[in-house]
Image (spheres, rainbow, N blue to C red):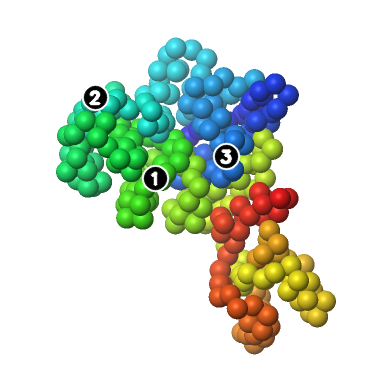
Amino acid sequence: MLEAKSITVAFGDNKVLNNLSFTAKKGEIVGLVAPNGTGKTTLFNVMSNYLRPKSGEIVFDEKYKYESEKSEVYIHKHLISFPEQKDLFDDLSGIEHLYLYADMWKGNRKQVKDVVEYLNMGHYVKNKVRTYSLGMRQRLSFAMMVAADTPVMIMDEVMNGLDITNVALISKKLAEMKEENKLIFVASHLLENLDLYADRVWYLKNGHFVHEQIYEEQQDAFIKVDISEEQYQFLKQKYELPLEHHFIAKHKLCFPITGLDMKEQTKWIERFLEISNHELEVGPLGTMEFYERYYLEDE
């Protein structure tokens, strides 16, 4: 388990993290969403002890903190952060990087062969990293974390630079590692991808979490349709929209249908189709809707 207690980080007068607290347990994937420059990497750096907060503390397994050498060694043995591409060694091969991480954290290299095969890296893993493309480097960084095989993993933009095939492959591996009782934090700009494997998603704004999306809870269903501001005002004037509806970022109407019978749902669908030539979508609010709601509506 990992717990953050009242974490505050400030750069001058700017509080990037403001009295932030949370608890996360093993066997779950937690997504972290926010625009660039608003605290995601700062939070991960505090969790990894790369940055000391102005106040607050990180507690690992209910008793270990970054306050003594013994505790720090214990935490770093059980927690790993996603390697940045600039930290890779151009003159080492991919397989040498994997052996390095396996030796440093897991203590053996038995799983390295399986990691290479799973991520389809066999045709280039013995080449020097200087020959790698952006996507190959990104896949290597992920493979290094898998080789380390720690209980807690912090992944900042793990999908960056990957094609659709590798995004799907790594998403599948993340879900498998969750089943192995790992605690995984993922910050990603591929919002809809988080819907596929995350258990929770936190939305960070102005130094604190403005929303927590929990997937295991029963979620209300919505009809979602793109309409203009003018079309939205027309609907409001002609019909009584329920209080629970959302008009997100001045382009998407999310109309609640939980509790409506099929006749009522059909009636509303027909009304939306009369004014919009966009396809309708039915389902719960996802990461894309929440992102636009919290970060784009003020623009």
In the foreground, 200 or 99: 99
Q: Dividing the picture into quarters, in which one does residue 76 lie? A: top left
Q: Dividing the picture into quarters, in which one does residue 260 lie? A: bottom right
What is the distance, in whole Å, between disc 2 and disc 3 at their CAs? 31 Å
Decide which of tag 1 and tag 2 comes sooner along the chain.
2
In the image, taking residue 59 as reference, residue 262 lies left or right, namely right
Tell me which residue sits at (65%, 31%) in the image. 17
Q: Is residue 199 above or below residue 37?
A: below
Identify the amino acid type marked 1: Gly
Q: Which mark is residue 91?
A: 2
Q: Percent x, y for residue 20?
A: 64, 33
Element at label 3: loop
User: Residue under circle 1?
Assistant: 161
Label 2 crowd bin: few (<14), some (14–19), many (20+), radius 10 Å:
few
User: Residue under circle 3?
Assistant: 36
Q: Which mark is residue 20?
A: none
Tell me which residue sits at (63%, 69%) in the image. 226
Does the rendering let one see residue 30?
A: no
Q: Percent x, y for residue 54?
A: 64, 20
